[in-house]
Image (cartoon, helix red, strand yellow):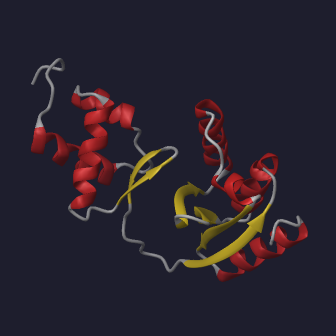
Amino acid sequence: MSTEQKIFGETRRNLILKWLKESQGPVTGGELSRRTKVSRQVIVQDISLLKARHEPILATSQGYLYVQQQQKQLYSRIVVCRHTPEQTERELTLLVDLGVTVKDVTIEHPVYGDLTASVMVSNRNEVKQFLKKLTTTNAPLLSELTDGIHMHTLEANEITKLDAACEALKEAEFLA
């Protein structure tokens, strides 16, 4: 197949699914677009179709991620936090440094109810990428809609890491 040719329809979606499953980390829409020789918008539509088929694909700030079945026992906890937008990096870095993954952020909107967005950061590099994406897109944090109040789902392979994370958030005065 020529590298100049577009990959069409179901063949393209099957390849996208294969690449996501094989990837050790997120794959950007731009990368999928480049590989298949179609627009980024076509990739967005393909991902929507794959999600409609119940494929566990997660859109993160770093790209698309196929959610593999976990082999290890993971523990999760929801924490309620409050801080300024300027303190976001400190909050996320504090958590990932303790071995905790920040899966998402949720706010309680007065009109729409609970709004949840994927965060999926588990190390300092991912925190930096997340913050860079916020800066380059000029997108506001969800917590800016609720005077800094928000919830995170935290995940770790040991319950003691979640305990330590909660204690660190308390010490930093981030727990609401």
For the point 72% across and 56% down, the residue is 92
Q: Residue at x 37, y 70 (%)?
A: 69
Vertical comparison of 36 with 14: above or below:
above
Closer to us: 6 or 159: 6
Using residue 34 as the reference point, say whether residue 76 is left or right of it: right
Q: Quadrant of residue 29?
A: top left
Compared to residue 72, the image places residue 98 above or below, namely above
Q: Nearer the viewer, residue 170 or 123?
A: 170
Q: Position of residue 85 (x, y in %)?
A: 77, 48
Q: Quadrant of the N terminus?
A: top left
Residue at the outermost front position: 111
At which x and y percent is residue 135?
66, 34
Q: Position of residue 91 (x, y in %)?
A: 77, 57
- Pinpoint residue 142: horizontal percent, then vertical percent: 63, 54
User: What is the quadrant of residue 12 in the picture?
Assistant: top left
24 sits to left or right of 120: left
Is 52 on the left or on the right of 141, as rendered? left
- Along the viewing direction, whichever of 108 and 130 lies nearer the viewer: 108
Q: Residue at x 71, y 81 (%)?
A: 160
Query: Which quadrant: the C terminus?
Result: bottom right
Q: Residue at x 22, y 31 (%)?
A: 36
Report how many numbered discs are placed on residues in the image.
Answer: 0
